[in-house]
């Protein structure tokens, strides 16, 4: 009899939680629809737009749950405000979601875009920042670019490869290169890389940009994830450090992504293509950067904050990834902020 009552109680609680979750989902979707339609109720969203809204909801929901778990685990500087939907500015989030959706970024697609919760001390709420992945940067560059290349080639150069740059001069009408992988099974260590912008009808515009390994390394996020870049990480046992372990990571893939991002960030934006969505996205990038500075100031002042997880993208400088203080295992994030639950590089 007691077991039956417990089962009924658990079922009732589960049903209540499901209804609450559905209510949040409906509120979110309605806000997004309102932003999409500009408040004009008779305009109907397409099935694609509705699916996109749900994709953003699911991505934000996962990000909030992960951030709340990390908040609960913190032993010092623990913010008392739970990272939940109740503490999110839904109206502002809906505007941001519509902005990125119109640009064409979909959080269900790998390396497009990822939501990152962070504390807004002025409102005593959490805002949701959006970190563009390397595919998202490519998509935006192609959409808003002034003179988009017909092809963008990105390669890493290893010690045993043969690589030669052919610069434009009196004997060569356009820039080019010679690149040969002599032995794909024994290429040796990475010594650099390059990207090449190719224009089929106007090869005179072709451009090659080379990177030494030092050039790649200096673009590495300050607090890069060991799971992806490789290196040593602390081993924890019973909540205490118990030595170090070496992690192989996915160093080659991270180096390649670094050059890939640079290749598309180098495409000039056409001022005539800039729209309200592009401008708002840039404003949100600046807001995230300001939030990181504020978080660092608060951290140094020993005030209570929540870490901003992931990478802040700044077209004017190297990519920045904010430090994780939490010693416990958590879903890894690569340079693009892509959450991955397995051991792979998330591409």
Image: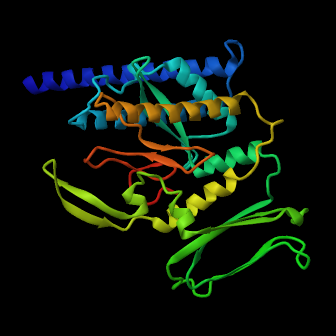
Classify residue 118 by image quadrant.
Answer: top left
Report how many numbered discs are placed on residues in the image. 0
**64 or 7: nearer the eye?**
64
Q: Position of residue 318 (x, y in %)?
A: 56, 51
Q: Is residue 51 left or right of residue 333?
A: right
Q: Is residue 111 left or right of residue 270?
A: left
Q: What's the residue at 26%, 30% (across, down)?
A: 78
Q: Is residue 5 visible?
A: yes
Q: Which quarter of the figure is the N terminus placed in?
A: top left
Q: What's the residue at 39%, 32% (across, down)?
A: 297
Q: What's the residue at 78%, 64% (across, down)?
A: 207
Q: Position of residue 59 (x, y in %)?
A: 48, 37
Classify residue 41 by image quadrant.
Answer: top right
Residue at the far left: name it.
2
Compared with residue 90, is residue 214 higher up or lower down, i.e. above or below?
A: below
Q: Is residue 205 left or right of residue 153?
A: right
Q: Position of residue 48 (x, y in %)?
A: 65, 34
Q: What's the residue at 79%, 52% (across, down)?
A: 148
**281 or 65: nearer the eye?**
281
Compared with residue 217, is residue 298 higher up or lower down, i.e. above or below?
A: above
**73 or 318: nearer the eye?**
318
Q: Position of residue 301 (x, y in %)?
A: 31, 30
Compared with residue 323, is residue 211 higher up or lower down, i.e. above or below?
A: below
Q: Is residue 135 left or right of residue 121?
A: right
Q: Is residue 343 visible?
A: no
């Amino acid at each position: 009899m007691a077991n039956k009552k417990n089962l009924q109680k658990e079922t009732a609680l589960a049903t209540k939680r499901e209804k609450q979750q559905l209510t949040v989902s409906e509120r979110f979707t309605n806000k997004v629809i309102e932003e999409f339609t500009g408040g004009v109720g008779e305009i109907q969203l397409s099935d694609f737009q509705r699916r996109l809204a749900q994709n953003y909801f699911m991505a934000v929901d996962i990000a909030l749950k992960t951030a709340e778990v990390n908040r609960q685990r913190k032993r010092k500087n623990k913010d008392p405000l739970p990272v939940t939907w109740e503490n999110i500015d839904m109206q502002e989030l809906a505007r941001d979601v519509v902005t990125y959706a119109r640009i064409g970024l979909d959080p269900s697609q790998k390396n497009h875009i990822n939501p990152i919760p962070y504390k807004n001390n002025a409102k005593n709420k959490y805002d949701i920042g959006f970190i563009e992945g390397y595919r998202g940067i490519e998509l935006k560059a192609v959409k808003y670019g002034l003179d988009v290349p017909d092809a963008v080639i990105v390669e890493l150069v290893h010690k045993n490869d043969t690589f030669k740059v052919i610069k434009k001069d009196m004997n060569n009408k356009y820039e080019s290169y010679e690149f040969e992988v002599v032995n794909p099974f024994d290429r040796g260590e990475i010594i650099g890389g390059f990207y090449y912008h190719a224009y089929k009808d106007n090869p005179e515009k072709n451009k090659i940009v080379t990177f030494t390994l030092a050039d790649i390394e200096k673009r590495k996020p300050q607090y890069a994830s060991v799971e992806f870049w490789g290196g040593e990480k602390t081993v924890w046992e019973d909540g205490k450090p118990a030595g170090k372990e070496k992690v192989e990571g996915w160093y080659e893939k991270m180096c390649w992504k670094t050059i890939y991002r640079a290749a598309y960030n180098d495409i000039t934006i056409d001022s005539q293509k800039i729209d309200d969505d592009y401008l708002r996205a840039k404003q949100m990038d600046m807001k995230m950067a300001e939030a990181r500075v504020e978080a660092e100031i608060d951290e140094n002042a020993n005030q209570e904050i929540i870490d901003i997880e992931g990478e802040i993208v700044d077209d004017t400088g190297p990519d920045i990834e904010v430090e994780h203080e939490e010693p416990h295992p958590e879903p890894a994030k690569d340079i693009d902020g892509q959450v991955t639950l397995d051991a792979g590089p998330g591409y």
